[in-house]
Amino acid sequence: MPDMLVNLLHLPDEAEQVGAMRNIGVVIRRANTFEASAVRRFIEDNFSTGWADELMPCFSRQPVSLHIAIADGEIIGFAAVEATCRNYFGPTGVLPQQRGRGVGTALLVVALHSMRTSGYAYGIIGGVGPAEFYAKAVGATIIPDSTPGIYANPLRKRS
Ligand SMILES: CC(C)(COP(=O)(O)OP(=O)(O)OC[C@H]1O[C@@H](n2cnc3c(N)ncnc32)[C@H](O)[C@@H]1OP(=O)(O)O)[C@@H](O)C(=O)NCCC(=O)NCCS
């Protein structure tokens, strides 16, 4: 699971991504602090407890450093920034039945723009995952010798 580097100075247009999602009935926006439990449940139910734990720091910031995608009043995807380490993007995920409609790309682009606004010129995608998705969506490139990165020596999983 290598890390990837993204040039935040050459990101796809944010408004275009958000607008395209709106056109298919999907709202992309920052999560609110009062939605922390709902987001946590969504991630535990559909992804993992580890990811739910990982993004806890996002809810101790203002603004919250996590974006969600909503359709029909329900969360369908999320993207975290600076959950694991400073300057890191991830984790991120979209419900299986909602994939392939651009939701993951829109969340990624909006989240990376928020990193740029925070003052970073480059961002790191930690421990990918679908490298082709990141390369295609935002021109991310693999960081040499980045395996194992911050996710080395994980605890044995417990239920
Ligand atoms: C990765 C993920 C967030 C992408 O979400 P999505 O809403 O399906 O993404 P998009 O619809 O914006 O896809 C954009 C393009 O990337 C491609 N793509 C999406 N997921 C991909 C994957 N896992 N591997 C390779 N390509 C992928 C799509 O086919 C699409 O290509 P197209 O435009 O030619 O059709 C989603 O597949 C997911 O939740 N995966 C499981 C969790 C995960 O792996 N998270 C990343 C951890 S680093």
Image (cartoon, rainbow, N blue to C red):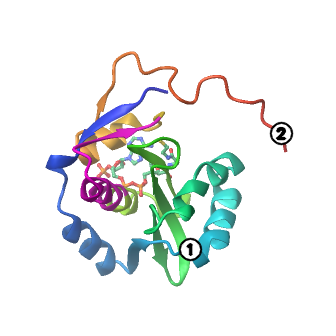
Q: Where residue 156 sits in the image (x, y, percent)? A: 78, 30
Which residue is labeled 2 in the image? 158
**Compared with residue 135, is residue 53 higher up or lower down, i.e. above or below?**
below
- Mark 1 crowd level (few <14, some 14–19, many ≥20, 10 Å Cα): some
Question: Foreground residue, 36 or 158?
Answer: 36
Tell whether position 119 is magenta.
Answer: yes
- Tell me the magenta residue range: 108-126
The residue depicted at 48 percent of the width and 75 percent of the height is: 70
**Compared with residue 130, is residue 54 higher up or lower down, i.e. above or below?**
below
Which residue is labeled 1 in the image? 33
- Mark 2 crowd level (few <14, some 14–19, many ≥20, 10 Å Cα): few
Q: Amino acid at mark 1?
A: Thr
User: Of all residues shown, which one is farthest toward the bottom?
Assistant: 72
Helix, strand or loop at mark 2: loop
Tell whether position 77 is magenta.
Answer: no
The residue depicted at 54 percent of the width and 72 percent of the height is: 75
